[in-house]
């Protein structure tokens, strides 16, 4: 009797897979989801602003998704997203009376819309699936087109999954009021990226995913709305991430732990930690408190105050997104599940500060906080 | 949603479908499609129907090759893996030994008769490709009895799922394939018959997915010269097997569970238990001394 | 350095895998055990953080567009 090497069970299961009645999984139901969200960034205080508005952004987002199996081996997906944004943004910084940086903000609010549409197709084979997606995003000053290819392979009888992804994106930037403010009229940039991940079932109640990705950006990478913002025309970025899921029977709850490390050659390093506790209350309700901690180190060419004496070919930026800071998000989600539909609602509170980061830095006056609320509905048929 | 229980006979055994059929589906259509699928396997692989594919293949033994379809070719490939994994015990050509060992025999066959019978069997003697099969000696025959009933359960379950059924089970003569847990989420309680009893269950297994098969040598046996012999013949020695009386196995597919439980009964008691251990699938085995072994309660 | 600790932990967890039989996968199939419990939500947060922070990428991220303000 064969009692060693590969388990006979594995050999038999492998052989069974070639039988017509037994094949790889594909979604059997059509799924439709909608979500509407709204967030408000907190206004700046008067003493941080030298000129311009003190309000930040208000953004409303509506999302729609439809995923449907169209035959035994194919499924198609459509995603549509619309954002309406209005508010003022930082144009630059100057040294205030106390020597600290103060903001020059844009003027009265502007109402902008962004629409994104994505189409995808997935093919399901034996223990593998392949997908292709096209994405198009448009707003009044920015257009982007991207293509994404992906493959997933099941191994070890579905206990492990290898996933590879590749994407290419091409963006066009046409800043508004270019002539009035002496901004560039039209620029472009593109990005190529590749990613890989391995998902492993550890035991009956937990899984772990380990992944890595790399992206190369090239083209016009400056922020065209800043008074003085000069960045290299290439950026190489990479990241590694972990996602752990574990179910606790005695608590009837699942723990989510995510970690991401990011690094690029602008000099930015960041860590992102996320934890969520999905607790089941009865058969239908699920409550999920969650917390996110983010910490980034400053870019090599970040400066707190715009220095116009520096030559315009030397990299510099006072964009708060390139400064050293940390941020916390505290969130709560509630989900109500029925067999064929579910409703979810969530709120989040985000705060950031130069002092929260792992390598503490000076507070950039434009570091923001916001509150977000969203409601979603999911239908399966 | 309607719960439907339909009982019918196919492949020589009592069969049962238990399905939770959503209102939007045509109940009669779902049931008749499933029953038709079971009958399709009987039409194709039954030795007792002269028009079946298997009968035509057996009738052409020693004469010519017969064309086969991809489903049959896949089943043959699967039985080859069973043959290899069981070191030759699971052999779909072993059916011809029925001429050596049968009911109403008065005396034990002589070793010479057994030897002659063995020349007509041997999976490795088959000549087959993806589109045809040839049995080289007259008297050779294929018997898919150990695998088609289980595969049919998987096929019916897949068919039901493709029609939109998410909760239900298929039971073909004691081999059960679960389509999905009961509508309220609870598992299906499946009983394993006590081989030494009179039809009561010796164990109840709760299954919400996967398949449970039971192979037993207690229902059919011969009495020759005062001794009871199992109807299962060891294809390597030509003699009836003296081993486990019953083995029940759980696996994701019925065909896999069925192969594991069948092979367990073709070995002697120690070999059968070792085989079940090595497969690492949950099992319940009962030996001739009525002792229960295994990882199922 | 932090990253080495994290990679080491990942390797330790991955090598401690047990074999899980198909009929034991009920828990893993629960919606709250999926890598993404709410795909629209994940896409939303990816976009929100992408426009406010310097980092991008991570599991399942990437999309076109800026929406930067």
Image (tube, coloured by chain):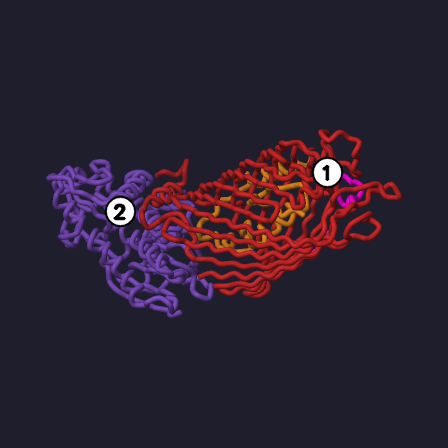
The correct choice, above or below, for B163 with respect to A149 in the image is below
Between the residue at mark 2 and the residue at mark 1, the CA separation in whole angstroms equals 61 Å
The reply to whether the magenta stretch includes residue A212 is no
Q: Which residues are magenta?
A: A349-364
**Where in the figure is residue B133, as x and y percent of width and height?**
19, 40
Question: Extreme right residue here?
Answer: A98
Q: Nearer the viewer, residue B104 or A26?
A: A26
Task: Count residues near mark 2 (Cα–Cα under 10 Å), then give few for <14, some for 14-19, many for 20+.
Answer: some
Provide the residue designation for mark 2.
Answer: B71
Chain depicted in orange: C
Residue B238, located in which quarter of the rendered image? top left
Q: Is residue A71 left or right of residue B95?
A: right
Helix, strand or loop under label 1: loop
- The subunit carrying tag 2 is B
Q: Nearer the viewer, residue A262 or B19?
A: A262
The correct choice, above or below, for A109 with respect to A15 in the image is below
Tell me the shade of chain A: red
Provide the residue designation for mark 1.
Answer: A297
């Amino acid at each position: 009797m064969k009692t060693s090497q590969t388990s006979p069970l594995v050999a038999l299961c492998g052989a069974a897979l070639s039988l017509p009645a037994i094949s790889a999984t594909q979604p059997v139901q059509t799924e439709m989801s909608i979500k509407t969200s709204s967030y408000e960034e907190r206004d700046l205080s008067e003493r941080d602003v030298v000129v311009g508005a003190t309000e930040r952004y208000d953004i409303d987002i509506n999302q729609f998704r439809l995923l449907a199996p169209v035959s035994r081996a194919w499924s198609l997906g459509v995603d549509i997203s619309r954002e309406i944004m209005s508010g003022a943004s930082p144009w630059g910084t100057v040294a205030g009376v106390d020597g600290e940086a103060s903001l020059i903000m844009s003027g009265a609010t502007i109402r902008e819309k962004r629409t994104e549409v994505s189409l995808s197709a997935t093919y399901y084979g034996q223990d593998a699936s392949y997908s292709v997606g096209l994405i198009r995003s448009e707003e009044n000053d920015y257009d982007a087109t991207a293509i994404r290819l992906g493959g997933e392979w099941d191994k070890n009888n579905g206990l492990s999954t290898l996933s590879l992804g590749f994407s290419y994106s091409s963006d066009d930037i046409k800043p508004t009021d270019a002539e009035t403010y002496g901004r560039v009229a039209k620029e472009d940039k593109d990005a190529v990226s590749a990613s890989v991940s391995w998902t492993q079932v550890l035991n009956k109640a937990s899984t772990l995913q380990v992944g890595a990705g790399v992206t190369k950006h090239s083209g016009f990478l400056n922020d065209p709305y800043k008074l003085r913002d000069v960045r290299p025309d290439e950026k190489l970025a990479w990241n590694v991430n972990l996602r752990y899921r574990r179910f606790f029977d005695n608590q009837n709850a699942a723990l989510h732990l995510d970690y991401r490390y990011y690094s690029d050659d602008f000099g930015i390093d960041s860590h992102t930690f996320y934890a969520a506790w999905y607790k089941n209350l009865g058969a239908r309700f699920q409550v999920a408190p969650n917390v996110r901690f983010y910490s980034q180190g400053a870019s090599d060419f970040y400066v707190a105050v715009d220095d116009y004496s520096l030559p315009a070919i030397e990299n510099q930026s006072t964009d708060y997104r390139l400064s050293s800071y940390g941020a916390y998000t505290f969130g709560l989600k509630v989900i109500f599940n029925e067999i064929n539909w579910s409703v979810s609602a969530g709120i989040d509170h985000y705060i950031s500060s130069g002092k929260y980061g792992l390598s503490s830095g000076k507070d950039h006056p434009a570091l923001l906080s916001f509150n977000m609320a969203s409601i979603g509905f999911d239908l399966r048929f | 949603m309607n719960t439907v229980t339909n009982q019918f006979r196919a492949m020589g055994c009592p069969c049962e479908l238990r399905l939770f059929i959503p209102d939007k589906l045509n109940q009669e259509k779902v049931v008749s499609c499933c029953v038709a699928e079971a009958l399709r396997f009987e039409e194709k692989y039954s030795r007792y129907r002269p028009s079946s594919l298997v009968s035509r293949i057996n009738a052409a033994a020693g004469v010519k090759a017969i064309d086969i379809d991809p489903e049959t070719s896949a089943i043959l490939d699967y039985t080859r893996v069973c043959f290899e994994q069981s070191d030759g015990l699971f052999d779909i050509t072993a059916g011809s030994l029925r001429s050596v060992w049968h009911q109403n025999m008065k005396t034990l066959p002589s070793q010479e008769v057994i030897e002659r019978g063995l020349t007509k069997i041997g999976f490795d003697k088959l000549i087959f490709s993806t589109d045809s099969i040839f049995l080289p000696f007259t008297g050779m025959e294929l018997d898919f009895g150990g695998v088609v009933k289980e595969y049919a359960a998987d096929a019916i379950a897949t068919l039901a799922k493709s029609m939109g059924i998410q909760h239900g089970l298929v039971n073909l003569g004691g081999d059960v394939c679960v389509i999905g847990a009961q509508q309220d989420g609870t598992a299906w309680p499946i009983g394993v018959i006590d081989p030494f009893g009179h039809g009561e269950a010796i164990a109840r297994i709760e299954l919400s997915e996967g398949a449970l098969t039971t192979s037993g040598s207690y229902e059919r046996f011969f009495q020759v010269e005062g001794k009871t012999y199992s109807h299962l013949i060891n294809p390597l020695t030509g003699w009836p097997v003296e081993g486990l009386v019953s083995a029940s196995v759980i696996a994701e597919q019925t065909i896999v569970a069925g192969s594991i439980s069948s092979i367990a009964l073709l070995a002697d008691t120690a070999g059968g238990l070792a085989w079940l251990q090595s497969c690492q699938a949950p099992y319940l085995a009962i030996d001739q001394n009525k002792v229960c072994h295994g990882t199922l309660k | 350095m932090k990253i080495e600790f994290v990679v080491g932990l990942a390797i330790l967890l991955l090598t401690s895998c047990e074999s899980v039989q198909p009929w034991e996968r009920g828990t893993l199939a629960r919606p709250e055990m999926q890598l993404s419990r709410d795909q629209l939500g994940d896409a939303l947060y990816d976009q929100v953080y992408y426009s406010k922070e310097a980092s991008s990428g991570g599991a399942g991220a990437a999309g076109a567009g800026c929406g930067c303000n």
